[in-house]
Image: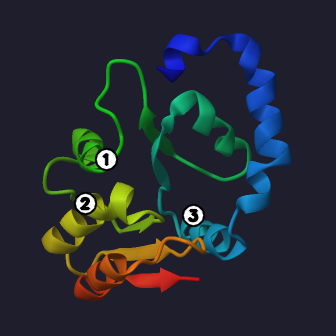
Amino acid sequence: MPYDIYDKYQDKYIEEYWNLTIKKYFRINVVSFLNEYVEKGYKIWIVSASPLIYVKPILEFMKIDKIISIEPNKIINYAIGKVYRVEEFVGENLDNIYGYIGDSFNNDGQLMMKLKNLHPKTLVKYVYTGHNLDKNTLIFLKKFNIEIIY
């Protein structure tokens, strides 16, 4: 649907929204953490449940190598869809993934769980956004030994 209603006229508003609003929500500790890995030579990918046209402006703020996001004629990047989309690029065994940071159990949980099941030493972290730590999420994080970033 977002692609059905999108036109180039929106680009300046998308850019403005990132500059005036989204940028304020960047978690400095997460950005610093990711930048450390960029400096070590790791590639940073974003796996988003948002349409690519709305996520792409992050390239102006961080060194990102790939954005896997909602695109026309692709599997939706939500929950199990994130797993399928990442598998398209790295295979079903999710090889060569050093780490993953998620901020939504409903959206990121299946990919986090698969990573930890296949590669228990994979660095997986969960960002607490102030409203996303219910009892089930805490059980999940503890069971899979996933660190919380506050």
Q: Quadrant of residue 95?
A: bottom left
Q: Position of residue 113 (x, y in %)?
A: 23, 68
Which label lies toward us, 2 or 3? 2
Q: Secondary structure at mark 2?
A: helix
Q: Residues within 10 Å of mark 1 (few under 14, many from 20)?
A: many
Q: Which residue is nearer to you in this view: 128 or 93?
A: 128
Residue 37 can be seen, yes or no? yes
**Three-letter amino acid code at the position of disc 3:** Val
**Three-letter amino acid code at the position of disc 1:** Lys
Q: Residues within 10 Å of mark 3 (few under 14, many from 20)?
A: some
Lower sequence index among marks 1 and 3: 3
Please give the residue where the numbered disc 3 appears in the rendered image: 38
Label 1 close to label 3 by CB (< 8 Å): no
Q: Is residue 65 above or below residue 56?
A: below
Residue lying at the far front of the rendered structure: 135
Q: How many marks?
A: 3
Please give the residue where the numbered disc 1 appears in the rendered image: 82
Q: Position of residue 134 (x, y in %)?
A: 41, 78
The color scheme shown is: rainbow
**Residue visible at 27% across and 42% down?**
81
Q: Is residue 15 above or below residue 66?
A: above
**Three-letter amino acid code at the position of disc 2:** Gln
Q: Position of residue 94 (x, y in %)?
A: 21, 57
**Residue visible at 60% across and 67% down?**
39
Q: Position of residue 16 (x, y in %)?
A: 83, 35
